[in-house]
Amino acid sequence: MRTTVKRNKKILKNSSNEISHTIKKMKEKEIKYTIILVSFFFILFCFIGYYTLKINESEMKHLKMKNLQEDTIALSGNLITLTNDNIIINNKKDRQIETELIIENNYHKTTTYQITFTKDEYMAKQCGCLKDDFPNSTIHYTINDSEEKECTSTSTIIEKGTITGNSKKTLFLKMWMTQSEFLKQDSHFHGYFSIEEIK
């Protein structure tokens, strides 16, 4: 009878060890499969994300090209700052700012346009010269050495013209400030040029 009890205890102990070992193996397998699944889904999401970005990038390029075709005209060389060095005194023309405005027509038809010169409020605020205002009439300019003109307001149309389809056009601009009682010693002016199609 004692022998039977011992055997039963031994069997129970072995069974318990086997169950513990089995559970341990199952847990190890579970962790292993979890890692594999997580890795699989991570790689899958990476691929999905990559191809989604590629598609979006392709669509953006397409839209950009479409906009370039529909957006008939573009302008480069459009920022300018006038300082004391550009105040004409005794007709010294070397004080002028000389720059090029390049117009590009991306459309296939001839387009009529206008270019506007506007005070750059944002740059003036960043520079801290927003309060140092003076009449726009002190700002003068010529385009392609034509007749001298002056700015009439904070937003002045300086040029109207046409440009043929799929072509570029360069305007040679000279700009300066005339001597005035309103101009302080450290006066300067921030402005920009913008272009729009006239329909």
Image (tube, helix red, strand yellow):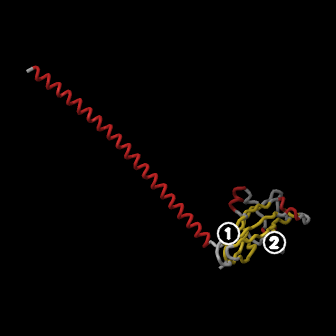
Q: Residue 29 occupies which quadrant of the picture?
A: top left
Of residues 108 and 81, the one nearer the viewer is: 108
Q: Are marks 1 and 2 in contact (CB under 8 Å)?
A: no
Of residues 177 and 148, the one nearer the viewer is: 148
Say left or right for 99 vs 71.
right
Mark 2 or mark 1, which is nearer the start of the sequence? 1
The answer to whether 182 is drawn above or below residue 10 in the figure is below
Q: Quick one: SS at disc 2?
A: loop
Could you say where residue 71 lies in the image, as x and y percent from the top left? 62, 71
- The residue carrying mark 2 is 144
Say left or right for 72 vs 62.
right
Amino acid type, residue under disc 2 in the picture: Asn
Q: Residue at x 73, y 73 (%)?
A: 157
Which residue is farthest top? 2
Q: Residues within 10 Å of mark 1 (few under 14, many from 20)?
A: some
Quadrant assignment for the C terminus = bottom right
The answer to whether 139 is drawn above or below residue 40 in the figure is below
Q: Residue 90 occupies which quadrant of the picture?
A: bottom right
The answer to whether 198 is drawn above or below residue 38 in the figure is below
Quadrant assignment for the N terminus = top left
Q: Residue at x 49, y 55 (%)?
A: 50
Which residue is farthest right? 90
Q: Residue at x 81, y 72 (%)?
A: 144
Q: Which mark is residue 74?
A: 1
Could you say where residue 114 lies in the image, as x and y percent from the top left? 71, 74
Say left or right for 96 vs 79.
right
Q: CA distance from mark 1 to mark 2?
A: 19 Å
